[in-house]
Image (cartoon, rainbow, N blue to C red):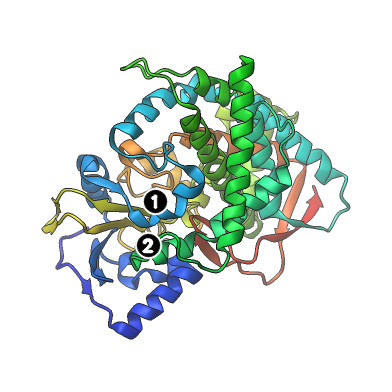
Amino acid sequence: MSETALPTLSPGRWQTLQLLRKTVRNPLEFWPAEVYQQRMVRLNFLGASRYFVSDPGYIQTALVDNADKLHKSDQMRRALEPALGHGILTAEDERWRAQRRSVAPAFRPSAVNSFIPAMIAAARTTLARWQAMPDGAAVAVDREMMHLTFEIILETMLSGRGDIDVAQVERSIADFLQSTSWAVVLAALGLPEWTPFPGKARAMRGRSYLRGMMTKRVGERRHSGDRHDDLLSLLLDARDPETGAGVSDTEVIDNILTFIGAGHETTALALTWTYYLLSHHPEVEAKILAEIANVTGGAGLEPGQVAELAYTRQVVMEAMRVYSPVSMIGRTVMQGFRIGQQDLQQGDRLLVPIHAVHHHVMLWDRPEVFDPDRFAPEAAKARHRFAWMPFGAGPRICIGMQFALLEAVAILGTLLPTLRLRAKPGYVPVPISRVTTRPDQGMPMTLMRR
């Protein structure tokens, strides 16, 4: 991208009100159109400068070179901390670094690969249930994928559901995430955290259930001394390699809830959007099926074969470009630094609009077109590494990235050869951001045997 003068927008009172309404309805509508066309855009809004950074080089300057001068935005902190506490997603400075060091061993390749059998087993359970449905059955794919990935999270993180009410957990997560747009707006307005808003009581009930449920599970495991081959046991026994300190029960609870809330949502939505895109691109689906058949020989997918599904992985990555599960990264500048020709000051807001980066006219040829060949090895190598960033960037890149990609490929490799899903005729889903990016009215599809 070439250097140009920084576009600056200063909305009036009526425009500011409209922007606030858009943020509550769908934060994706808040963004100026220029973020899809310019390297960086400044928006003077509610007494603060907000810099939308879409250029990959600028993103690297901010999130890598100056990561220590940024904190999570106060809006996102206020939206997420009530449920997630101060886990790896929301903690700052040394508190974050200590947790990252302690948690990292659980996400090494060997550890992640050990979870693949559980991923395939859960997918086979879904397959069996779908096979019992008649041809032409209506399926809410977004809910199906949420349920499937949640079962995987329960097995890999907690060694099964135990006495957990899965339906209640799923409702609690949905209720809490539904409230986040209001929390962001109230924080931007500088209103106190006790300020009421529509749905707050329901969101807080969901938060209380989630934390109560996890407090009970962690306490039982800690006091019994029982250990399993799961993330909870790894966290209970984890030690900071630098200090030798263990992870407190509160930190264990915060991080398990982070992985449950953020982990299963992002993968489920990536799969939801992938199924929708495949229903409109049968030629891509045919290439996936050919790859799966070649790798498995027509038998069911086995854990050791998931890594061989290279084209299937490309499809997932392209789906995550077209519909990024997380639409934006928000930071507050704690210490000033320069991006390009612009000096950012303490207190400024820095926003990386991931959805806009993934659709930027200067970064992608025909950005609205679904083309998995963009992620063929040579094509990906020629592109800036921060042109695609559904998992973030820099030291705070999502620690579960490889888990999520392997999970998505394992699920597709298990389900696609037997059953196909087709979008409801004429249905065009509208992406809406609630921390994660979901279809506003769900994803109704039709199930058919091959």
Name the residue tied to disc 2: 187
Structural crowding at the residue carrying mark 2, measured as other residues with C-alpha within 10 Å and reported as few (<14), some (14–19) or many (≥20) = many
Which circle's residue, 2 or 1, is located before the other in the chain?
A: 1
Using the image, determine if residue 116 lies above or below residue 243. below
Residue for point 66% across, 57% down: 279
Q: Image quarter for residue 4?
A: bottom left
Amino acid type for the residue under numbered disc 1: Arg
Kindly state the secondary structure of the residue where label 1 is placed: helix
User: How many numbered discs?
Assistant: 2
Q: Nearer the viewer, residue 95 or 282?
A: 95
Give the x, y percent position of residue 128.
82, 39
Give the x, y percent position of residue 355.
42, 58
Residue for point 58% across, 57% down: 203
360 on left or right of 144:
left
Using the image, determine if residue 150 lies above or below residue 50. above
Amino acid type for the residue under numbered disc 2: Ala
